[in-house]
Amino acid sequence: MQTRVIILAAGEGKRMRSAIPKALHTLCGRAMAEWVMEAARGIDAHPVVVVGHGRDAVMAALDGRARFAVQESQRGTGHAVMAARDAIPESGAVVVAAADMPLLGSDTLEALAAGVTRDGFAAMALTAIAEDPAGYGRVLRDDRGDVAGIVEHRDATPAQREIREINTSVYCFRGDLLRSLLDRLTCDNDQGEYYLTDVIGLMVRAGHRVGALRCAPDEALGINDRAQLAQAEAALRRRINEAHMREGVRIIDPAATYIDAGVTIGGDTVVYPGNVLESGARIGSGVTLYPGNRISASRVGDGATIQSSVLVEAEVGNGATIGPFAYLRPGSKVGAGCRIGDFVELKNAVIGDGTKVPHLTYVGDAQIGERANIGCGVVFVNYDGHKKHRTTVGDGAFIGCNTNLVAPVTVGRGAYTAAGSTITEDVPEDALAIARCRQTNKDGWVRKHASRYEEDI
């Protein structure tokens, strides 16, 4: 039996107080809607996302991974499903979920769908037991344990308000019944909206069986404001960190470690507190990540050590040492066994195996060979005010402290530059380049000009 998924993402989310559409607020590197799509992937690889507020941004963000239906005006959950009517299979089932429930699990949605496709219920409602059910719709059950109805909090009797089983607004319906009953929904209520919960009541009154599946309370969390966003992200972060630890990663303080979805980490890697590993990060085995790193869309090889540094779209080879306070910008590739020290910035630079760039250096648009040494305070002068130019440094070269390499320029294999030089011409292999004025001492200069400084004082 075919099962489709409809994800409701048309709401404005006024309580988020944001210009960003609610469905696109991110948690652990993924938009809210993407988390729900991931949970539904085992049922429907290309769900229908109902868009409304900020629809252009939502459609652009999810393009290629979803189909879309437009809810021109937001008039309730039933109205949203009406907008996606064409996606409802005539002979199959349809799961309806909200885009603001990122903690939903794939196993939960698959079990919910199985209640219709396998167990013969006309519909299944996802429910949860809430410590404080105030504000939520209550689930009423009959003698068999089936759903007898769903009553909103404001309409519930005092006895019904004592019920702690709540409706999560996630359902699975038999497609043909949902299609027919959508036409019977009315907006005759205080809000003037079409409620999807009314479909459940229509099914029950028509004698159809409606089942319920209870999920864990955290899965039922819907995000309406920034506080709930933080609460949900903390729960996702715990799941992600626990999964890595079960795979052999040591995370010293999971509560102070921030790892996005999709990050890969090899076994025996140690992650200290304060690390932020963003989407696209691939960390090898036996790596040590000391406190204070941000690693985004970068690859770190086995056995590397990184401390208090930023890596963005960069690569670090096996056994390399980075930091503290290094900045590897996009296009930077650091070879095996390299040392990139404190206050070093790399940009679009390829560093050969075994090369050292110990401290206080900028390397931009460069190709450095193996086993070279780049001294303190070296600047690769790559920009002439109009274009970026490239510098090449050969294997085993030694660049003295405070050298300026004015690109385009090549320093040959095994060549040296004297400290304080400004190199504007190519340096041959094994040569020493000295490009600085000869020192001149002027005797008595200070006494001669002392009166000038005294006046300044």
Image (spheres, helix red, strand yellow):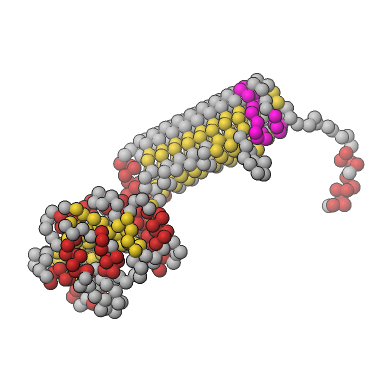
Q: Is residue 373 above or below residue 387?
A: above
Which residue: 11% across, 64% down?
209
- At x 38%, y 53%, the residue is 63
Question: Residue 151 appears at what percent x and percent y?
Answer: 21, 72
Which quadrant of the figure has residue 441?
A: top right
In this rendering, the answer to whether 426 lies above or below 100 is above
Please say whether residue 109 is one of the residues in the magenta stretch: no
Question: Residue at point 63% right, 41% down?
Answer: 387
Q: Nearer the viewer, residue 56 or 335?
A: 56
List x then y, in percent, for residue 305.
47, 35
436, 37: nearer the viewer: 37
**Taking 363 as reference, is 130 left or right?**
left
Is residue 244 visible in the rendered structure shown here? yes
Q: In this orientation, does residue 221 appear?
A: no
The quadrant holding residue 137 is bottom left
Highlighted range, magenta: 405-425
Whether residue 406 appears in magenta in the rendering, the answer is: yes
Nearer to me, 152 or 121? 121
Is 182 positioned to the left or the right of 353 in the image? left
Q: Residue 278 placed where, x, y %?
A: 43, 46
Please tell me which residue is depicted at 42% across the width and 42% down the height of the picture. 281
| Snapshot quadrant of residue 268 | top left
Total number of numbered discs in the rendering: 0
From this viewpoint, which residue is outermost toward the top? 430
Looking at the image, residue 216 lies above or below residue 361: below
Give coordinates of residue 388: x percent, y percent.
62, 40
